Image (spheres, rainbow, N blue to C red):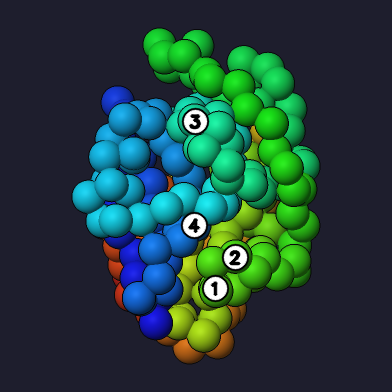
Amino acid sequence: MIKVHCVTVGLLAENCYLVHEDGRNDTVVIDPGDDGDAINAALTAYGLTPAAVLVTHGHFDHVNAANMLARRGCKIYMSKADEPLIRTDMNMGALMGGKFVPFEPDVYVRDGDVIDECGMRFRVMATPGHTIGGVCYICDEDKIVFTGDTLFCLGIGRSDLPTGNGRELEASVRKLYALDGDYTVYPGHGGRTTLEYERKYNPYV
Protein backbone atom coordinates (compact mmCIF):
# COMPACT_ATOMS: atom_id res chain seq x y z
CA MET A 1 0.00 0.00 0.00
CA ILE A 2 1.32 3.42 -1.00
CA LYS A 3 1.55 6.24 1.54
CA VAL A 4 1.49 9.85 0.33
CA HIS A 5 2.61 12.86 2.38
CA CYS A 6 2.02 16.37 1.03
CA VAL A 7 4.42 19.22 1.81
CA THR A 8 3.15 22.57 0.54
CA VAL A 9 6.07 24.87 -0.22
CA GLY A 10 7.09 28.20 -1.71
CA LEU A 11 5.37 31.46 -2.58
CA LEU A 12 3.01 29.71 -4.98
CA ALA A 13 1.96 27.06 -2.41
CA GLU A 14 3.09 24.13 -4.55
CA ASN A 15 2.40 20.57 -3.42
CA CYS A 16 5.50 18.40 -3.10
CA TYR A 17 4.67 14.74 -2.46
CA LEU A 18 6.68 12.19 -0.50
CA VAL A 19 5.57 8.77 -1.73
CA HIS A 20 6.59 5.44 -0.24
CA GLU A 21 5.41 1.91 0.37
CA ASP A 22 3.95 1.42 3.82
CA GLY A 23 6.69 -0.09 5.98
CA ARG A 24 9.56 1.20 3.81
CA ASN A 25 11.52 4.41 4.24
CA ASP A 26 13.01 4.77 0.74
CA THR A 27 10.95 7.44 -0.91
CA VAL A 28 10.05 8.98 -4.25
CA VAL A 29 9.73 12.78 -4.17
CA ILE A 30 7.30 14.21 -6.72
CA ASP A 31 7.77 17.86 -7.73
CA PRO A 32 10.29 19.07 -5.13
CA GLY A 33 9.29 22.72 -5.02
CA ASP A 34 10.81 25.96 -3.89
CA ASP A 35 11.80 25.16 -0.30
CA GLY A 36 14.44 22.49 0.14
CA ASP A 37 14.64 23.06 3.89
CA ALA A 38 10.93 22.32 4.36
CA ILE A 39 11.19 19.19 2.22
CA ASN A 40 14.22 17.95 4.13
CA ALA A 41 12.46 18.66 7.42
CA ALA A 42 9.43 16.65 6.31
CA LEU A 43 11.59 13.74 5.19
CA THR A 44 13.27 13.74 8.61
CA ALA A 45 9.97 14.04 10.46
CA TYR A 46 8.53 11.03 8.64
CA GLY A 47 11.78 9.05 8.86
CA LEU A 48 12.11 8.84 5.08
CA THR A 49 15.12 8.64 2.77
CA PRO A 50 14.74 10.19 -0.70
CA ALA A 51 15.81 7.93 -3.56
CA ALA A 52 14.25 9.37 -6.71
CA VAL A 53 12.58 12.53 -7.99
CA LEU A 54 9.70 12.60 -10.48
CA VAL A 55 9.09 15.97 -12.15
CA THR A 56 5.70 16.69 -13.72
CA HIS A 57 6.94 19.85 -15.50
CA GLY A 58 9.81 22.30 -15.45
CA HIS A 59 8.42 25.40 -13.72
CA PHE A 60 10.61 26.71 -10.91
CA ASP A 61 7.98 26.23 -8.21
CA HIS A 62 7.95 22.49 -8.91
CA VAL A 63 11.69 21.81 -9.26
CA ASN A 64 13.75 24.23 -7.19
CA ALA A 65 14.75 21.56 -4.65
CA ALA A 66 15.68 19.01 -7.33
CA ASN A 67 19.34 20.01 -7.20
CA MET A 68 19.41 19.56 -3.43
CA LEU A 69 17.91 16.09 -3.73
CA ALA A 70 20.34 15.17 -6.50
CA ARG A 71 23.16 15.97 -4.09
CA ARG A 72 21.55 13.49 -1.70
CA GLY A 73 21.84 10.81 -4.36
CA CYS A 74 18.40 10.97 -5.97
CA LYS A 75 17.88 10.09 -9.62
CA ILE A 76 15.77 12.73 -11.40
CA TYR A 77 13.12 11.82 -13.97
CA MET A 78 11.40 14.34 -16.27
CA SER A 79 10.18 14.79 -19.84
CA LYS A 80 12.81 15.85 -22.37
CA ALA A 81 10.20 18.06 -24.03
CA ASP A 82 10.37 20.33 -20.98
CA GLU A 83 14.16 20.61 -21.06
CA PRO A 84 14.00 24.11 -22.65
CA LEU A 85 12.20 25.32 -19.53
CA ILE A 86 15.06 24.39 -17.23
CA ARG A 87 17.65 25.93 -19.58
CA THR A 88 15.96 29.33 -20.05
CA ASP A 89 13.75 31.87 -18.27
CA MET A 90 10.72 29.87 -19.42
CA ASN A 91 10.91 28.13 -16.02
CA MET A 92 9.15 31.30 -14.77
CA GLY A 93 11.49 31.89 -11.83
CA ALA A 94 12.63 35.37 -12.79
CA LEU A 95 9.27 36.29 -14.30
CA MET A 96 7.51 35.45 -11.02
CA GLY A 97 10.02 37.41 -8.94
CA GLY A 98 11.81 34.31 -7.73
CA LYS A 99 14.97 32.44 -8.61
CA PHE A 100 15.52 29.22 -10.53
CA VAL A 101 17.93 26.62 -9.13
CA PRO A 102 19.45 24.64 -12.04
CA PHE A 103 19.58 20.85 -12.02
CA GLU A 104 20.43 18.01 -14.41
CA PRO A 105 17.86 15.31 -15.19
CA ASP A 106 19.14 11.73 -15.15
CA VAL A 107 16.33 10.03 -17.07
CA TYR A 108 14.02 11.48 -19.71
CA VAL A 109 10.55 9.93 -19.68
CA ARG A 110 8.01 9.50 -22.46
CA ASP A 111 4.34 8.63 -22.66
CA GLY A 112 3.76 5.03 -21.60
CA ASP A 113 7.06 4.58 -19.77
CA VAL A 114 6.96 2.67 -16.50
CA ILE A 115 9.23 3.73 -13.64
CA ASP A 116 10.05 1.20 -10.92
CA GLU A 117 11.41 2.94 -7.84
CA CYS A 118 11.31 2.14 -4.11
CA GLY A 119 9.08 -0.89 -4.63
CA MET A 120 6.47 1.15 -6.51
CA ARG A 121 5.48 1.39 -10.15
CA PHE A 122 4.65 4.73 -11.78
CA ARG A 123 3.20 4.88 -15.30
CA VAL A 124 4.00 8.01 -17.28
CA MET A 125 1.18 9.77 -19.11
CA ALA A 126 2.13 12.67 -21.38
CA THR A 127 -0.24 15.56 -20.63
CA PRO A 128 0.93 18.64 -22.55
CA GLY A 129 -0.91 21.90 -22.34
CA HIS A 130 0.29 23.64 -19.19
CA THR A 131 3.77 23.09 -20.60
CA ILE A 132 4.74 21.22 -23.74
CA GLY A 133 6.39 18.43 -21.75
CA GLY A 134 3.96 18.08 -18.88
CA VAL A 135 3.41 14.54 -17.60
CA CYS A 136 1.33 12.82 -14.95
CA TYR A 137 2.47 9.84 -12.90
CA ILE A 138 -0.04 7.05 -12.34
CA CYS A 139 0.03 4.26 -9.76
CA ASP A 140 -2.61 1.98 -11.28
CA GLU A 141 -2.59 -0.65 -8.56
CA ASP A 142 -3.37 1.91 -5.86
CA LYS A 143 -5.59 4.06 -8.11
CA ILE A 144 -3.53 7.22 -7.58
CA VAL A 145 -2.51 9.89 -10.10
CA PHE A 146 -0.16 12.83 -9.57
CA THR A 147 -1.34 15.49 -12.00
CA GLY A 148 1.06 18.41 -11.51
CA ASP A 149 -0.55 21.52 -12.98
CA THR A 150 -2.72 19.68 -15.51
CA LEU A 151 -5.75 19.01 -13.31
CA PHE A 152 -6.79 20.58 -10.00
CA CYS A 153 -9.83 20.23 -7.78
CA LEU A 154 -12.49 22.05 -9.83
CA GLY A 155 -9.82 23.57 -12.04
CA ILE A 156 -7.15 23.03 -14.67
CA GLY A 157 -3.73 24.53 -15.23
CA ARG A 158 -2.93 27.74 -17.05
CA SER A 159 -2.18 27.46 -20.74
CA ASP A 160 -1.02 31.06 -21.33
CA LEU A 161 2.58 30.56 -20.12
CA PRO A 162 5.52 29.72 -22.43
CA THR A 163 4.93 26.45 -24.37
CA GLY A 164 1.35 26.23 -23.05
CA ASN A 165 -1.55 25.32 -25.32
CA GLY A 166 -5.22 25.40 -24.35
CA ARG A 167 -6.42 22.78 -26.81
CA GLU A 168 -3.66 20.39 -25.77
CA LEU A 169 -4.48 20.98 -22.10
CA GLU A 170 -8.15 20.15 -22.62
CA ALA A 171 -7.19 17.00 -24.53
CA SER A 172 -4.83 16.01 -21.71
CA VAL A 173 -7.54 16.44 -19.07
CA ARG A 174 -9.91 14.30 -21.15
CA LYS A 175 -7.14 11.71 -21.41
CA LEU A 176 -7.05 11.59 -17.61
CA TYR A 177 -10.84 11.33 -17.45
CA ALA A 178 -10.61 8.30 -19.76
CA LEU A 179 -8.73 6.27 -17.16
CA ASP A 180 -10.76 3.25 -16.13
CA GLY A 181 -12.56 3.73 -12.83
CA ASP A 182 -11.88 6.24 -10.11
CA TYR A 183 -8.47 7.53 -9.02
CA THR A 184 -7.36 9.76 -6.17
CA VAL A 185 -5.89 12.90 -7.72
CA TYR A 186 -2.91 14.61 -6.08
CA PRO A 187 -2.52 17.97 -7.88
CA GLY A 188 0.34 20.44 -7.96
CA HIS A 189 -1.66 23.06 -6.06
CA GLY A 190 -4.69 22.92 -3.80
CA GLY A 191 -6.42 19.98 -2.18
CA ARG A 192 -6.65 16.45 -3.45
CA THR A 193 -9.70 15.28 -5.34
CA THR A 194 -10.87 12.29 -7.41
CA LEU A 195 -11.28 11.72 -11.10
CA GLU A 196 -14.93 10.82 -10.62
CA TYR A 197 -15.60 14.12 -8.87
CA GLU A 198 -13.80 16.10 -11.57
CA ARG A 199 -15.60 14.26 -14.37
CA LYS A 200 -18.88 15.36 -12.84
CA TYR A 201 -18.19 18.84 -11.49
CA ASN A 202 -15.08 20.40 -13.06
CA PRO A 203 -16.41 23.53 -14.83
CA TYR A 204 -13.50 23.84 -17.26
CA VAL A 205 -13.39 20.42 -18.96
Residue situated in front as seen by the camera: 205 or 27 = 27
Q: How far apart are marks 3 and 1 (CA)?
A: 23 Å
**Dot placed on the residue nearer the N-terminal end, 1 or 4:** 4
Q: Where is residue 56 in the image (x, y as percent from the top left)?
A: 57, 48
Residue situated in front as seen by the camera: 27 or 135 = 27
**Quarter-wise, where is residue 187 in the image?**
bottom left
Q: How far apart are marks 4 and 3 (CA)?
A: 14 Å
Do tag 1 and tag 4 residues touch (Cβ < 8 Å)?
A: yes
Mark number, residue 68? 3
Per the image, label 1 sits on a secondary structure element best described as: strand
Q: Which residue lies furthest to the bottom in this view?
A: 181
For residue 131, side relative to residue 156 (left or right): right
Mark number, residue 28? 4
Q: Circle 2 sits on which residue? A: 117
Identity of the amino acid at label 1? Met
Q: Please tell me whether residue 85 is drawn above or below residue 27 in the rendered image.
A: above
Identity of the amino acid at label 4? Val
Q: Circle 1 sits on which residue? A: 120
Do tag 4 and tag 2 residues touch (Cβ < 8 Å)?
A: yes
Within 10 Å of disc 2 (Cα), the crowding (few <14, some 14-19, many 20+) is: some
Do tag 2 and tag 1 residues touch (Cβ < 8 Å)?
A: yes
Q: Where is residue 11 in the image (x, y as percent from the top left)?
A: 30, 26
